[in-house]
Amino acid sequence: MPKKIKSGLIQMSLPKTEGEGTIEEIKTAMLLKHLPYIEDAGKKGVQILCLQEIFNTPYFCPGQDKAWYASAESIPGKTVERMQEYAKKYSMVIIVPIFEKEQAGVLYNTAAIIDADGTLLGKYRKNHIPHTSGFWEKFFFRPGNLGYPVFQTQYCKVGVYICYDRHFPEGARILGLNGAEIVYNPSATVAGLSQYLWKLEQPAHAVANGYFMGCINRVGEEKPWNIGNFYGSSYFVDPKGQIFAQASEDKDELLIAEFDLDMIEEVRSTWQFYRDRRPETYGKMIEL
């Protein structure tokens, strides 16, 4: 029997930004803007839904304003608990990327993974933290300390890799070795800097590791930071490296696609990358 999955990605622009309300009001506006899209995904039978990086705030990292520390919240906490209600309502796995506060002064860029019965399965913390070209993330986030977990959901095995992580093949390989069938990469990336890599790196990860990927980007300009245009173009790519569904560059959108996980077996039976690995020769990678 084919192992079909229906998955969704939501790309979203800001309804309200700095100077247009308190941080809590900005977060609430972004959450409320997402809810109809989440409801639509559930009504259309989406089994696994992923939101964009730190989905309920602006991408505030072009600045270094400690006021945004107040936007961090615990996991579980108010936002994740609300998403658990939607997951249970629609029997839908939801991946919820937020700014996580573990304790005072200990903050992470994190995605919570909620199973289709509303259970919080765990979380992934972004491992690779950029600090360059207006992406001053080290001011806000500690590097992840949970490794590269894979979560057995009711539908399949899911991994998460967040934004800048995608530039590093090592973690992408570990997710495959840990059994991921689909890896989601919620992102915030702008035109001009790494746009040329957007459709190169993740298809390459999918091919090298024989899994599907769902890749999400924000939409529009975000003032007052004006780092550039978040160009959307969220997409799904299969283990052959083919992009088979893609969203627009410039509008809020729920992208839905169906795919058959049996392709993983087909591809890995052709390209025996896992069989032919030589980990005993790779020691130099961690010596340098």
Image: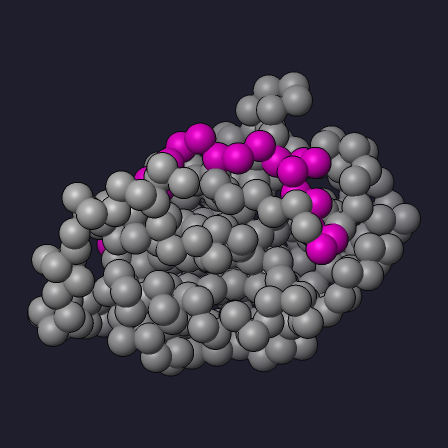
Quarter of the figure with residue 213? bottom left
Q: Give left or right: position of 118 versus 25.
A: left
In this rendering, the answer to whether 207 lies above or below 55 is below
Q: Position of residue 23 (x, y in %)?
A: 79, 40
**Image quadrant occupied by the C terminus:** top left
Q: Which residues are magenta?
A: 133-158
The residue lying at 51 percent from left, 44 percent from top is 128
- Residue 117 in sight here: no
Relative to 136, is 166 above or below? below
Which quadrant of the rendered structure holds the N terminus? Answer: bottom left
Q: Is residue 147 left or right of residue 10?
A: left
* Along the line of sight, the residue nearer the viewer: 205 or 72: 205
> Which residue is rendered at x = 58% and y = 32% of the image?
142
Is residue 127 visible to the viewer in this orientation of the structure?
A: yes
- Residue 131 horizontal/vertical position (percent): 66, 45
Q: Residue at x 80, y 34 (%)?
A: 67
The answer to whether residue 168 is magenta is: no
Residue 149 within the segment the image draws in magenta: yes
Q: Please report the residue visible at 75 percent of the width from the left and 66 percent of the height from the top.
A: 228
Q: Quadrant of residue 45?
A: bottom left
Q: How many marks?
A: 0
User: Looking at the picture, how far across and down is residue 138, in whole percent?
Assistant: 65, 38
Give left or right: position of 158 versus 221.
left
**Apparent side of residue 122 relative to residue 255 in the rendered image (left or right):** left
* Up-down relation of residue 122 to residue 160 (above or below): above
